[in-house]
Image (cartoon, rainbow, N blue to C red):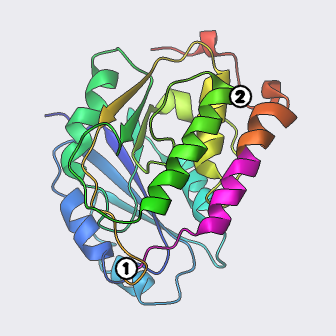
Amino acid sequence: MKEILSVIVPAYNEEKTISAVLDELIPHELVGEIIVINDASKDNTAQIIKKYSSVTKIKIFEHDINKGKGAAIRKGFDEASFPIVIIQDADLEYSPSDFSAITAPIVSGKADVVYGSRFQGGPGRVLYFKHQLGNRLITFISNLLTDLNFTDIETCYKAFRREVIQNIIFESERFGIEVEITAKIAKAKLLKIYEVPITYNGRTYAEGKKITWKDGLAALWHIIRFNLLKNPSSYFKKPWDKLSR
């Protein structure tokens, strides 16, 4: 199959898993480039990533200070050069084996954006009920304001036509990027959006999970901010009807 994917890998203190993630991405038949952004990790993540510097597919970027997941993803969006862009966390919660299913609606011309949903029936590890409840609450409130029927806006796996994601101006530095992406694609009325079920192997806090209840509260604020308090005309670089397919 053709290499069509720019994979963005934001990494912060992921020394236990980053090698396994990169080793799975490198030979993947759909992956054209892997954009790794080390967000000033304090462990050995940077040293591990440097071992991959000779791999043609991999582009490595370093933040001198910790800026947050949103800042890392924004850098990846700017650097992407392949037709489809997808986000891949640097842990082992999401599997690149789902790439074909996620990209299929874009490849066929049915979609401009595809979310991989953890709540549409794919296999997944049984973990925190309160996290699932929080995710569903955030998605519910977002759906009320966007009038879109997502099941999982906090998913890592979001794929985009490159022209689409590079036409959006993003601001969030940290985990707010998830709801900001959703709010802004919702304001672009011409975009076709799909969801597909994915597998999910969630991890515990002991295994390195970072998101907390504080990030959930921040997400609610960003939902209000980007859906109600800001002018959507500032979200995009040029009108959507000017973008080519």
- Left or right: where 5 falls relative to 155: left
Count of numbered labels shown in the rendering = 2
Foreground of the two, 220 or 238? 220
- Left or right: where 221 falls relative to 26: right
Image location of residue 151, percent across then percent down: 44, 35
Which residue is denoted by mark 2 in the rendering?
236
**CA neighbours of label 2 inside 10 A, class few (<14), some (14 to 19), many (20+):** some
Tell me the kind of residue under disc 2: Phe
Foreground of the two, 220 or 244? 220
Q: Tell me the tag on residue 81.
A: none
The residue stretch that appears in magenta: 207-222
Residue 14 image-quadrant placement: bottom left
Nearest-to-viewer mark from 1 and 2: 2
- Residue drawn at x 35%, y 14% is 110
Image location of residue 213, percent across then percent down: 62, 66
Foreground of the two, 168 or 81? 168
The secondary element bearing badge 1 is classed as helix
Image location of residue 187, percent across then percent down: 68, 23
Separation of marks 1 and 2 at Cα, in angstroms:
35 Å
Foreground of the two, 35 or 90? 90
- Residue drawn at x 39%, y 84% is 206
Q: Are marks 1 and 2 in contact (CB under 8 Å)?
A: no
- Residue drawn at x 44%, y 82% is 46
Q: Tell me the tag on residue 50.
A: 1
Q: Give the position of the C terminus as an image quadrant.
A: top left
Give the answer, above or below, for where 39 lies relative to 110. Answer: below
The secondary element bearing badge 2 is classed as loop
Give the answer, above or below, for where 155 lies relative to 100. Answer: below
Tell me the kind of residue under disc 1: Lys
**Magenta residues, dominant SS class:** helix
**CA neighbours of label 1 inside 10 A, class few (<14), some (14 to 19), many (20+):** few
Q: Earlier in the sequence, mark 1 or mark 2?
A: 1
